[in-house]
Image (cartoon, helix red, strand yellow):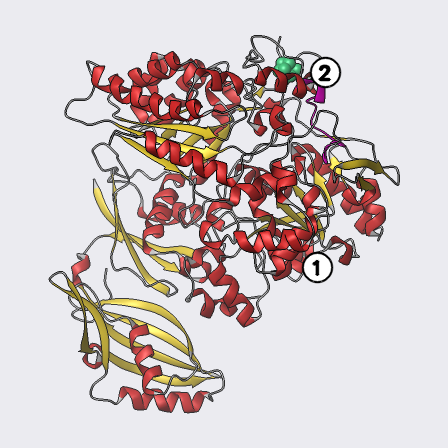
Amino acid sequence: MQLQQLDPILMRVQKPARYTGGELNSVTKDKNSVFMRFAFCFPDTYEIGMSHLGMKILYSLLNYREDTWCERVFAPWVDFEEEMKKENIPLYGLESFDPLYEFDIIGFTLQYELSYTNILNMLKLGGVPVLASERHDLKNLVIAGGPCACNPEPLVDFIDLFMLGEGEESMNELMDLYRDCKAANESKASFLQKAAQIGGIYVPSLYEVTYNEDGTVAQITPKDGAPKTVKKRIIRDFDKVFYPENFIVPFMGTVHDRAVVEVLRGCIRGCRFCQAGFLYRPLREKKPDTICAECRDLCESTGYEEVSLSSLSTSDYSDMESLLTQLFDYTQTRHINMTLPSLRIDNFSEELLEKIKAVRKSGLTFAPEAGTQRMRDVINKNISEEDVMHSCRLAFEGGYSSVKLYFMIGLPTETEEDIRGIIELAQRVVDLYYHTENRAKGQSVNVTVSVSTFVPKPFTPFQYEPQDTFAQIEEKHRILKDAVTSKKISLKYHHSDASVLEAVFARGDRRLAQVIYKAFLKGCTFDSWDDQFHYDRWMETFKECGLDPAFYANRRRSFDEILPWSHLDYCVSEAFLQRENKKAHEAAVTKNCRMQCAGCGANTLVGGKCFD
Amino acid sequence: MIDIRVFYHKTGRARYISHLDMMRCMQRAIVRAKLPVWYTEGFNPHIYLTFALPLSLGYESKSEVMDLRLIDDAFPLSEVTSRLNDALPPDIRIHTTAKIQNKPQAITHAIYTIQLFGNTQSAEVLRDRFCAFMRSTQILVEKRAKQGRRKITKQIDIRPMCELLSCEVSGDVVLLTLKTQAGIQSNLNPSLLLEAFIQTNEGLPLRWHICRDALLMEDGSPFC
Ligand code: SF4
């Protein structure tokens, strides 16, 4: 396809730059001189997808290969989709404008459960059969990876294989295999059998699942030589991992439009609600020199005026002092701003705050996650109220007058007292401001309380827990609202029944694939966008399929239940998760990995000990 | 310190970069090109640059103009051109860099070449219709405006604001050359004229491609 064909419809839609590509550092190759064409698909809009670090890494890694041309595909917004259908234009790769059905491999990244219907929609718009069973050839192989691949069961009807864990190594192994099989004209079945032998590759069609009468899983049986359990992949030497020398620089504004360097992977904290904290274990860091070199390369190849340090918990980086000193040396002479997201408050030193203050003037954000100490102990968020107050005092003394606090509701064992505790904590922060002597004069304080709904996720100690029903959550929102008496507190929560669906898919089994398929046929897409989400349509579909959302979302699971993802191994043992679950119910905390190993099992991935 | 003017083309995929995004795109290109530019002072320093006349989204242009300030008076201007070209995506091409001679206010007219695609219409019929349309003594269009705080629509006659320089058939397209008033005094967007043309012809199916070829000053010479 040519740009000219798109011209008339581009003028009729919002943000046409989403659909035109051609950005600096986007990769164009001669399609006749590559052997494999890869479509990296992000099942949400351009602005969201272009902010995603994993995509940047794999795009660059794949295009580094001479035999491969990797392009990007995003979910078209509803206005563009309508125009595409009217004009008979198939969904296309942004680099070549070629339709999706011309690509050898179509890869999706699974960042959140509510993007699943977009996957189906993108395949359909791209002229690719949605059901894996209707794709008979090796061409149009559909693969997926990312955090939700840890329980991909609801997607098995659509995706040919999943990549578990970090993709920087397994992606190349998979591409090599694909190249050989394509060259030898092998069948899709034969390729999939071979792929299942690569570490971290899960081929769902090679597993048979049977169910008990009560709806729980009875047995998961591998066939055709597929391994009994598939173990996630990690990069052992994280300091040497492939990192892009450049990023595509979008023309239009995106969610995170800046250079990003990854300082560490994994997390030492073990917050019991946090799936990422368990999925990416163990902690691995890059050396300060490596990070700085990557930062310099990126800033120079992109011209970005801002760089951020990315990880689950950047302030746990072991050599922060020397990293920041080196980075500031570079950025300050070049008019580059530095942002440090997700700073934890329990190791926020005055010195560090000084340095950050020099570059960041907006408000500060902290995530105590729960309002009472008991609740924080249950979720193992090892922060005391004193820590919160201490960090806020430092911030106020440093001239800040607005603070944003993040909390969750719907946590296991939660009582009304815990919920009111959220607002009470915020009120004490307000009071603290007026008791801080050298605060900024003449300003009024603002404490934003942002509350999200807890969703129990696989591979966490809370994977056995029931989610609150929507009615319970509504009631809790009401309690929160009633508890606020001060105008200095702004309460923000997301009132949506979409978190029910998120909970269902997060811990769902294979039978849910038919629900996703039918809901998609009924027009469900962009479920994470409030204005596009149709709760009724979904509930109607569950009924038609004879499945009950409450069975997946609101049921407590016993420790001996076979979980739908029990054949997937993220190297955190069930014994450990159960131990942690019991401790949660006793409100007993677990020390962080640096202080004391809790024996989760992830150390086997790095051969021995996680920390010296 | 020296103020310089960069002349560039904006074609292909770059046509869909909005004016605001273009600003950001150029700032980043300048950083990548490591040009000795002047940064504004104050709390949030940024590269000082201005654009002469905003281009509508979707238009191609061979007459884009950006002004910059260099802190090194002796920096070779040809170097600005080549370094920026290395740092920009292929659909934005710098062709000249020169010292600034006139203020952007000196722009009074623009020349556009326009391709009309008539779908079912033959190009000859389309040409005749368009020429007939341009022979009208008056072309009234609705323009949204503000009167105090109220938003109103008012009718204006755009016929005096443009002049058809040529109108011919080339294959199955009609090629127009149009001179319009442009600049801060009075500015006519060619799509406004084309939409009026569609209206007077009962909504005939028409697609077009617009390219701004040149910016002119009062005396008819190219803006520089
Ligand atoms: S093995 Fe121990 S130190 Fe390593 S990640 Fe697990 S709990 Fe932490």
Q: Which residues are magenta?
A: A563-576
Residue under the image location 30 percent in, 19 percent down: A428
Is A230 on the left or on the right of B180, as rendered? right
Q: Amino acid at mark 1?
A: Pro
Q: Position of residue A472 (x, y in %)?
A: 49, 36
Question: Is residue A610 depicted above or below B200 in this figure?
Answer: above
Residue A569 shown in magenta = yes
Name the front one of labels 2 and 1. 1
**Residue to which mark 1 is pinned:** A129
Q: Amino acid at mark 2?
A: Gly
Local SS, label 2: loop
Chain-order first, disc 2 or disc 1? 1
User: Chain letter of disc 1?
Assistant: A
Q: Position of residue B14 (x, y in %)?
A: 42, 58
Question: Label 2 vs label 1: CA separation?
Answer: 42 Å
Split into 4 quadrants, where in the image is the N terminus of chain A?
bottom right
Q: Position of residue A378 (x, y in %)?
A: 53, 18
Q: What is the quadrant of residue A13 in the picture?
A: bottom left
Question: Is residue A123 depicted above or below A370 in this figure?
Answer: below
- Residue A48 makes an appearance in the image: yes
Q: Compare residues B1 and B52 and report the one nearer the observer.
A: B52
Q: What is the quadrant of residue A608 in the picture?
A: top right
The secondary structure making up most of the magenta span is loop
Checking the image for residue A607, the label placed there is 2
Local SS, label 1: loop
Residue under the image location 36 percent in, 50 percent down: B81
User: Chain letter of disc 2?
Assistant: A
Checking the image for residue A148, the label placed there is none
